Amino acid sequence: MSDETVTSAEVDAGTTGGEPSTGEVKEPSFRQYIPEEFKDADYWASIPDEATLVKNYANAQKLIGKKGIIRPDDDAPQEEWDKYYGALGRPEAPDKYSLEAPKDFPKEFYREDLATDFRNWAYEAGLNEKQAGTIFNKYLEKSQVEIAQGIKAIETAKAETERELKAEWGDKYQENIELANYVIRECGDQKVKDSLEAGDPVWNNPNLARFLVRIGQSMSEASLIKGGGGAQASLDAKLAELARNPALLDEKHPDHAQVVAERDRLMKLKYDR
């Protein structure tokens, strides 16, 4: 046996040339400073030592510096939200949004009061100029498509009504239309007249046109009944006109029933007064 002496310190340090110590490895020293409420967090598993901890902290600071804008809590005061929205690019006031309708947008359908409302809503939502402009333009684009579809539908309905009434009234079409317009002028208020002048789609209803014509005919008949000699002459002239109509005697004529009914109605007016 060698006389060489081995100290206990050398054994503990594993420097004797034998197998290294198999004792339990101590945790990195920084862990003892972790507050209790954070000790169970999963992210500590990826930090084996102080060097990694320092590196991760430095990287986090870089990211925070780049971000620069921290979202307030939902219950934060309005002042904090105003600062946050301002940092994201919201204008100083609603009227600072530069929103305009496209040049080809129909002016008669653009309402500045609604544009003002939109500015207020965008400001309240914290939108920046680009966000507000994108939503505003997309809304107008959608509206423009719907407006065009609506105009086309009105024009289609107008054409269908005209075609239906021309087929029904024949040569009397223009006369009946003028009679219907006469009723509107005589009996309608200014709003009704303006609606007619503006081409309101309500006038594209063939049933409404028939109704107005019947009113006009009744007004004319009432005038004839009260009119005396001149009215009698006018009534006779209408009967004479019907008598010359070839549809009166031709039972196969498409207007035969209508002409006969009108002749009978006028005859009743003439002799039942």
Image: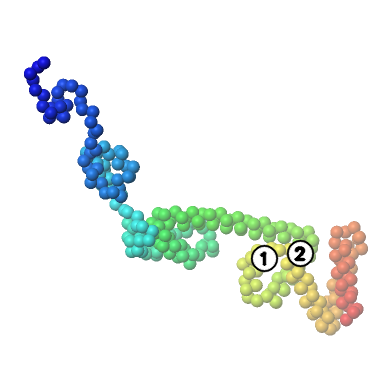
Q: Nearer the viewer, residue 146 or 178?
A: 146
Quarter the N terminus occupies = top left
**In the picture, residue 214 is in which quadrant?**
bottom right
Q: Residue at x 9, y 22 (%)?
A: 5
- Category of crowding for the residue at label 2, using alpha-carbon neighbours closer than 10 angstroms: few (below 14), some (14–19), many (at least 20): some
Q: Is residue 237 left or right of residue 68?
A: right
* Colour basis: rainbow
Q: Nearer the viewer, residue 32 or 41?
A: 32
The amino acid sitting under disc 1 is Val
For residue 215, which numbered disc appears in the image? none
Residue depth check, mark 2 versus mark 1: number of the one nearer the observer: 1
Q: Is residue 201 left or right of residue 16?
A: right
Q: Residue at x 62, y 71 (%)?
A: 194
Q: Is residue 5 left or right of residue 93?
A: left
- Category of crowding for the residue at label 1, using alpha-carbon neighbours closer than 10 angstroms: few (below 14), some (14–19), many (at least 20): some
Mark 1, residue position = 202
Q: Nearer the viewer, residue 215 or 68?
A: 68
Quarter the C terminus occupies = bottom right
Q: Residue at x 56, y 54 (%)?
A: 145
Mark 2, residue position = 173
Q: Residue at x 85, y 61 (%)?
A: 255
The amino acid sitting under disc 2 is Tyr
